[in-house]
Each structure stands twice: as C-alpha cells, then as structure tokens.
Amino acid sequence: MTDAIALTIHARDGAARTGALLTPRGDIRTPAFMPVGTAATVKAMRPEDVRATGADIVLSNTYHLMLAPGAERIARLGGLHRFMNWPRPILTDSGGFQVMSLAKLRKINGNGVIFQSHIDGSRHELTPERSMEIQRLLGADIQMQMDECVKLPCPPEEAERAMRLSLRWAERSKAAFGDDQPGRALFGIVQGGVERTLRIESARALVGMDFHGYAIGGLAVGEPQADMLATIEAVIPHLPDTKPRYLMGVGTPDDLLQSLRRGVDMFDCVMPTRAGRHGMVFTRAGRLNLRNARFADDSRPVDPLSTSAMARDYSRAYFRHLVKAGEILAMMALTEINLAYYQDLMAGARSAIGEGRLDAYIEETRRGWAEGEA
Ligand SMILES: CC1(C)O[C@@H]2[C@@H](CO[C@@]3(CNc4nc5cc6c(=O)[nH]c(N)nc6cc5[nH]4)OC(C)(C)O[C@@H]23)O1
C-alpha cells in the first residue's frame, strides 16, 4: 500500500521516536494520545475544547455508531467529521472488540460476529466487509481491521485460534477496504495473547499483507504492565520502522511512557475521560481523588503547571464541592484537566525524544508522581 498517511520521523532516542503522521485533515504529532470519542463525542467536552487540550486526532467506535444513530444516517448528514464538528483526523475502531466487551448474546462464527444490541436487544451481524463499509460511511481517516481479542488469561490454543481468525479477517478487511486513496489508511492489528511466538507470527503475517500502520491489540484487558511491555518488545522488531505503531486501549500515564520508550507512536484510552467524570484527576504530583475529604479546605489549584486554566485557576476545595454535589461542571472541568495532562505528557515526551533526554524526562516525571504532595 502506498503511504496514504505517511509517518515522518524527526528524531529518535533509543527505540523511541518522535515525528508526525501527515494527513489531509491535519498532522498528528507522535507520540500521540487520542481522546476517546466513542459515540461521536468526547464525553463532557466540546470539540474546540478537545482541540485546546492539544489533541490532533480522536477515536470513535463502529460498534456504538452502527447501533445509534446508524452509519448510513451519519453518511447522509455529511460524515462523522461534520456530524461531530471535528475537522481533524478521526480513527475508528472496527467493532469486534466492543461487541465482545459490551454486546449481549454474541456469537463469533467464521464469517463475523452475530450479537444483540446492548441498547435495545436488536440483532446484528458484523463482518469484516460490513465493518469496512461502516468506517467508510463514517469517513474515518484511519480504519482498523476487524479482529478478535481474547480475554486474558486464556489457554495458548484459544489465543492461537483468535489470532488466526484475526489474520483471515485482516485479509478480508484489506480486500473490502479497496484501493489506496490519499488520506485514507487501514491498520492491521497484531493479536496472539501473551504467546511470544504467536505475536511474532501475527506481526509477520500482517506486514506481509502491507498495511498503512500496525496496532498491537489484545492488551489493556487486565494483564500486568510487565506482560504488556514484554509483548511490545516482542512485536516491535517485526514491524516496519517507518510505519506507525498503535497500542490499543492504553493506558495510565506510566503505561504511555514505558510504551513510547519501546517505540509505540499512538495511544487511546478512556482513562482520562472516565476518571475525570468520577472525580479523579491526573497531575504532575500524581493522582488526586477529589471526592476525598482531605481536599475540603485545600485552596491550592489542582495543578499549577497544567496547560488547562481549569487546573490553575480553581481550588481543589471547589472541585471537591462540585464533585460531591454532582455538579455537571465537575465532569466537564476534570475531563479537560485530565486530557490536558495526557497531552502535556505526550508533548513533553516528544520534546525529550527530540533532545535525546527521554530517560531523564521519564525519571523526573515519575519522581513528581512519587514525591509530589498530591
Ligand atoms: C484501561 C481501561 C481504563 O480502559 C478501559 C478498561 C478496560 O480496557 C479497555 C481498554 N482496553 C482496550 N484493549 C483493547 C484491545 C483491542 C483489540 O485487540 N482490538 C480492537 N479492535 N480494539 C481494541 C480496543 C481495546 N481497548 O477496554 C474496554 C473494555 C473498552 O474498556 C477500556 O480499562
């Protein structure tokens, strides 16, 4: 495949690299964090505020949008970018993972997956061909192949079965994606559980099919960080150096630093948005659970060094009050603060890689969490 969306690498520091994915809708600075906008919205955020936190790209979900409001309806209304007023790049997940983690009565057969909607119980079938059609109707800049992600821990033979099915679905996804068009990319997804040999076989087979980028799937499903990092180390050497690597569903700030250090370029995770809605914020001094009574009289800002004014100009006591009162502003503000933290963390990593001081950056960031008087 030609590079419909090309990765340019500006600098390296060990296995880490910093650069940009150049797309017709805007450049994606890497390492990049993609806020999750599952149902055509990054929850509690206006798109202009998502952009103001530093996001270059957002993620959305085939599974949710096919159920409501429907992919054909979004296409009739001008596509997902217009629908949600996000003119920059959008990556869409392919739906198989969400079916397995959300839908009721789902059944995988060789052709695809049959399931009942978690919204109204209606029956649906999702195949690689239909997933590609939905992502095209949405207008995604980066589409994901349809795959099967096993729940961990699982027996090696189960991981092998799902890995081989995912490879068959990779072929079908690529065939259905069609010929290269500028600005439209399709990523393959490496599976294989925690089995090193299966992971390497999956990576090599996908590279042989020639995708625009490669995701590492099957992680951030409850496995220890050490298993996740070992999987990254096993897979990365078998992926092309000049194509983007995307670690799906990851993760905590420490997960991001440890993974980008090993050569990952792109991340997505619900953690900053989900935690914000529940009163937990990420700061340079570590995490704060603002429901905690210890913040009731704390007049200090959440994080004076944040790029978010909400983190600098309001007190912890105020946000604790809002959280306890169930005020809507708490969800909005703490979501923004967390997304700004994740983007600030990525921006710091990009600069550090550019200056060859990534290990020092990681060390000083982790020290801030450990020593910070959160
Ligand atoms: C980390 C955190 C906070 O993220 C939450 C919750 C549980 O983990 C998450 C995030 N982890 C996650 N791993 C993934 C793996 C794949 C994959 O192999 N294939 C495809 N197509 N999409 C994927 C999307 C993924 N998301 O998965 C759900 C269940 C969506 O909730 C998320 O813990």
Image (spheres, rainbow, N blue to C red):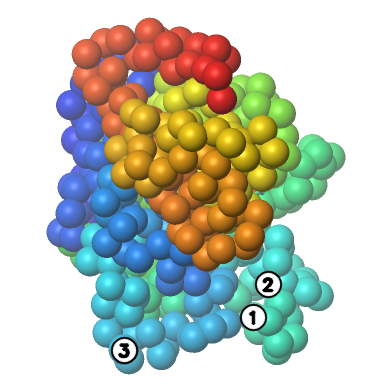
Quarter where residue 127 is shown = bottom right
Considering every residue shown, the one lying at the far front of the view is 297
SS of the residue at dot 3? loop
Residue 367 picture location, percent across and down: 50, 12
Q: Between residue 183 and residue 330, name the one nearer to us.
A: 330
Q: Is mark 2 on a helix, strand or loop?
A: strand
Numbered mark located on residue 113 in the image: 2
The three-letter code of the residue at mark 1 reads Glu
Q: Which of 279 and 113 is in front in this view?
A: 279
Circle count: 3
Q: Which corner quadrant of the image does residue 168 belong to?
A: bottom right
Cα distance in 3D space between marks 1 and 3: 24 Å
Name the residue nearer the viewer: 107 or 78.
78
| Measured Cα–Cα span from mark 2 to mark 3 | 28 Å
Q: Which amino acid does label 3 sit on?
A: Leu
Q: Position of residue 274 (x, y in %)?
A: 58, 53
C-alpha separation, residue under disc 1 versus residue under disc 2:
6 Å
Q: Which of marks 1 and 3 is nearer the N terminus?
A: 3
Residue 287, given in percent of the width and then of the height, sits at 57, 32
Mark 3 lies on residue? 77
Marks 1/2 in contact by CB < 8 Å: the verdict is yes
Q: Name the residue under label 1.
A: 125
**Amino acid type indicated by mark 2:** Val
Mark 3 neighbour density, 10 Å: few (under 14) some (14–19) many (20 or more): few
**Which is in the foreground here, disc 2 or disc 3?**
3
Task: Looking at the image, tell me whether mark 1 or mark 2 is earlier in sequence order.
Answer: 2
Image position of 150 with respect to 102: above or below: above
Q: Nearer the viewer, residue 174 or 21?
A: 21
Look at 32% across and 64% down and name the residue there.
Answer: 47
Give me the residue at 41% from left, 43% from top.
314
Labels 2 and 3: the sequence-earlier one: 3
Circle 1 — which element?
A: strand
